[in-house]
Image (tube, rainbow, N blue to C red):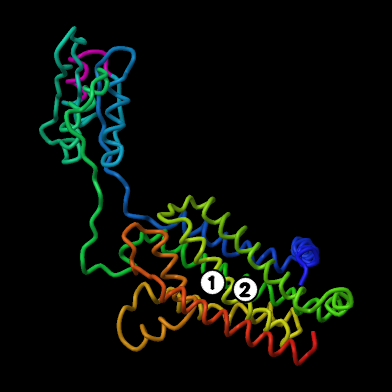
Amino acid sequence: MRLRRILAILGKDLRDAGRDGRIIVLLLLPIGMAIFYNATFDDGDTLPTTKVAIVEQEDRRVARELRDVTGKSVDVKVRQADDESSARRLVAENDVALAVVVGPTPQDGPARAQVLLGEEAPAAAQSVVALVPEALTRAAGGEPTAETKVRRVAAVDQKPYQMLEPRTLAVLIVIVLLVTFVAMMIVPIQTAEELETGTFGALRLAVAGEEILAAKALAGLVYTAVGVGLTVLITKLDLHAPLLFFGAAFALTISLVGFGLLLGLLVPNSNAINSYGSFLLFPFVGLAAAVFFVDSGVFATVLDLLPFSQAAKLLGDGLSAESPFDAGLLSWAVIAVWALLGYGALTQISSRREL
């Protein structure tokens, strides 16, 4: 096989995809679903809000530093007050939960401030009070006497789906759907259409059949890269291990695209694949999602033998620092075995048909 000829066929396939409304819809549908779920699902991580009045000089450094030190625990809404009496009135009238009256900057010694806290201040406001000294120290140009880092620790009995935010889990499942669409619908549609129109036979006069199939498999990887990349970018998905995440997406594409090419050869009717293929693929995606909810029994064993289920585990580990599955070589091995089975069957069928 020659790379130059494969790339030439790849370029043709990509141009054809841009003119085929069916392929564009199949690529945009999962991305649109990811955007919808990303905007709809509530992660449950909304920070408590506290209103704070601050009396300070015009540089307002204390306000900036207070927002910074509370940024990961409380959403502070700052309101500037002219003097102590106006700040006290705001607290008394419950317009703010607390007020910080910054004293004059001392020549030497620690920065000073008076904190006015309402009698019915919520717990979030009281937590802000504890961080006022650190904000004052930073605003004065000093360094805090101690620093702490907060890390979440998952409960030992948490299920995999509990370790991922609902929004993240929904987008992950949509990404599996996108990859499955690419490998098992888009690639077969392009293959079947070329067989229908005689384009495949015309290409076969100039290049080897293996080169045509290799170009279509490579096109599937390109569609996956573009689709998954856009989904991650648009939804602002936080990737804990990007290499693991994208590696799992590409591995699943490689594992399934052999079966997709085989489907295109056996069912040389692109409209039939487009009409009925999606109904057959949704159960596969459901099995991929099931690994987040099923962790024991015969069904869990069956899931361990499927490529899309193992890829979902790797994707989940790539998204979460808690590694819901700690998937390792076994997951990669299962995906690789299915890839070998797919390409082995493809080789047998294509050789019999003398492609």
Question: Relative to residue 260, is residue 7 depicted above or below?
Answer: above
Q: Position of residue 247 (x, y in %)?
A: 51, 63
Q: Is residue 84 magenta?
A: yes
Question: Relative to residue 92, is residue 33 depicted above or below?
Answer: below
Q: Position of residue 31 (x, y in %)?
A: 57, 60
Mark 2 residue type: Ala
Q: Which residues are magenta?
A: 81-90
Residue identified by numbered label 1: 252
Q: Is residue 122 magenta?
A: no
Q: Are marks 2 and 1 in contact (CB under 8 Å)?
A: yes
Single out the mark in the foreground, 2 or 1.
Answer: 1
Residue 333 relative to residue 56: left or right: right
The secondary structure that dominates the magenta segment is helix
Label 1 environment density (alpha carbons within 10 Å; few <14, some 14–19, many ≥20): many
The residue at 26%/32% (across/down) is 51
Residue identified by numbered label 2: 183
Q: Tell which of 236 and 28 is nearer to you.
A: 236
Mark 1 residue type: Leu
Residue 298 image-quadrant placement: bottom left
Farthest left residue in view:
119
User: Is tag 2's residue or tag 1's residue first in the polypeptide sequence?
Assistant: 2
- Count of numbered circles in the view: 2
Residue 156 image-quadrant placement: bottom left
Q: Tell which of 85 and 102 is nearer to you.
A: 102
For the C terminus, the image quarter is bottom right
The residue at 20%/28% (across/down) is 144
Q: Position of residue 300 (x, y in %)?
A: 36, 83
Residue 323 relative to residue 156: left or right: right
